[in-house]
Image (cartoon, grey):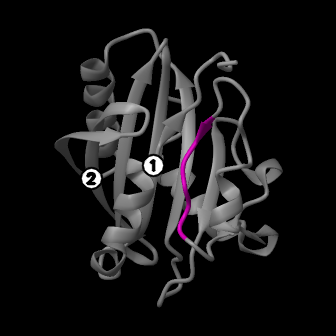
Amino acid sequence: MQLGFLAIVFSALSLLSTLQAVDVYDFEQISTSPGAVLFVPPKNWQIADGKELPDHVQFMVVGKGKYNFPPSINLSTEEYAGTLKDYLAIVKEINSSQGSEWKNLGMIKTEAGNASLSQADAMTEWGQVRMMHVILLRDGMIYILTAAALKKEFPSLYQTFFKSLKSLKINSKTHNT
C-alpha cells in the first residue's frame, strides 16, 4: 500500500479549484471500454482533475458539505497477489497505526460482485472524519471505493454514499457482439 487511506481523502481539499461538474446521467456513458472500472457518482457532485490525483487514485468526486471538509468518493486501485482476508488485515493495521478506528462491516453486493465493506473513523484537523470502504479483489488487483465525510455530516449522506458504493462496476474484458 503506497499511501494511507487518509492521504487520499485529504487530497480532496487541495483539488477544490480543479473540480468540474459531473452529469450523473452521462457518467455511465463515460467509459464503455473493456475492463473499465467505474461507479455512479451522486448527482451534482464535482469531478477532480485526474492529473492532480495520486497515481493509484483513478477517479474522485467531491460534493458540497455543510462544513470545511467536503464529502468525497474516490476509486483507487493497487496490484495485490494475496487474499482479500490478508489485505483487510493490512488495512486494519494501517488504520490502527494512524490512530484510526477501523471496523469490518462484512460483505456488500456491488455491480462488480461481492466486496468487503468497512468503516474507519479518524481524527483530523477538520474534526472526526468517517470513511466507508468497499474493497474488491479481482484478478490480482484491489479496487477500493472510499466515501468520506465529517462524522457529524455522515448520517445525512449515508444513502447517497451507499448507492454509489453499490454501483461499483467492472466492465467485462471483452465486448459481446
Q: How would you rate the neighbour count of disc 1 (Cα within 10 Å): few for under 14, some for 14-19, many for 20 or more?
A: some
Check disc 2 and report the residue beneath it. Answer: 119
Per the rendering, the mark at residue 167 is 1
Is 40 inside the magenta-drawn segment?
Answer: yes
* Left or right, residue 102 beside residue 64: left
Evaluate whether residue 100 shows in this view: no
* Left or right, residue 8 beside residue 86: right
* Viewer-proximal residue among 98 and 60: 60
Q: Position of residue 114 (x, y in %)?
A: 30, 31
Q: Dividing the image into 4 quarters, which one contains the C terminus?
A: top right
Please provide the residue range marked out in magenta: 37-42
**Secondary structure state at the residue bearing disc 2:** strand
* Left or right, residue 15 beside residue 165: right
Q: Position of residue 122 (x, y in %)?
A: 33, 61
Q: Amino acid at mark 2?
A: Gln
Q: In which image quadrant can residue 100 be found?
A: bottom left
* Main secondary-structure element of the magenta-colored stretch: loop
Q: Amino acid at mark 1?
A: Ser
* Left or right, residue 164 beside residue 92: right
* Viewer-proximal residue among 55 and 3: 55
